Amino acid sequence: MPRKVFHLPTLPDHPQRHIVDRALDGAYRRLRFSSEDLHPALAPFFEEISSLLLSTRELLLDEEHELKLCPHLLLCMGHKVGEEEREETIHLWMKAALLLHINLDAMEEQFEERLESFLQRGSGFRLKYVEAMEWEVVCYESIPFHVGHGKSFKLPPKLAAKKAVVNVDNNGGNDCFR
């Protein structure tokens, strides 16, 4: 299956934002936001990267395209296996949504709830530090053109014969909605 390519706006370089997955023509599918320090809790991590998330969101929002993404956290978790302490990377995912509809303030609360739910299941894991947050781009589409075009077109004979479709002729002007 051929890989879908996403043509997204160019982002300025930033030490805490990296393009993780790049397509052949320079487009990207995943952005990683990392912290300068290793935070053992979600709140300080979100506090550090919130301004970067907001500025990236503003760069990616435009009037011609819709960006749907799936945010997830990469967490370094520790757990004991026998007498040995092991580290595992755990991903906490949120449901994919349009970037326009994702509330960045509520995102922290949702991740906190998911982490708490995971830890209460008795898995023996404990959070060591937050590694990064990634935005995986799952869809990038043009917004459909929802205004009149000012020109009528000739209906196919089958449709014209049914008299069920109205084809307004405005004599070549742009007054079709007047």
Image (cartoon, rainbow, N blue to C red):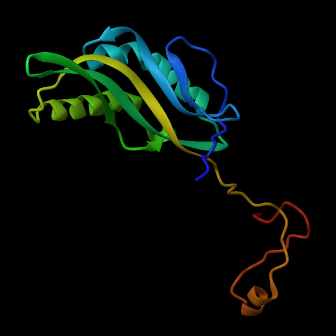
Q: Position of residue 43 (x, y in %)?
A: 28, 18
Q: Position of residue 45 (x, y in %)?
A: 34, 16
Q: Nearer the viewer, residue 167 or 38?
A: 38
Q: Where is 38 relative to 94, above or below?
A: above
Residue drawn at 42 percent across, 44 percent down: 96
Residue drawn at 47 percent across, 17 percent down: 51
Q: Splitting the image into 4 quarters, where does residue 25 fall?
A: top right
Q: Position of residue 164 (x, y in %)?
A: 68, 86
Q: Is residue 13 left or right of residue 124?
A: right
Q: Splitting the image into 4 quarters, where does residue 133 fall?
A: top left
Q: Is residue 111 left or right of residue 52?
A: left
Residue drawn at 22 percent across, 30 percent down: 115
Q: Quadrant of the C terminus?
A: bottom right
Name the residue at the bottom extreme: 161
Q: Nearer the viewer, residue 88 or 11?
A: 88
Q: Nearer the viewer, residue 164 or 98?
A: 98
Q: Position of residue 137 (x, y in %)?
A: 52, 39
Q: Where is 161 relative to 27, above or below?
A: below
Residue drawn at 15 percent across, 30 percent down: 119
Q: Is residue 116 left or right of residue 68?
A: left
Please tell me how many numbered marks the rendered image carries: 0
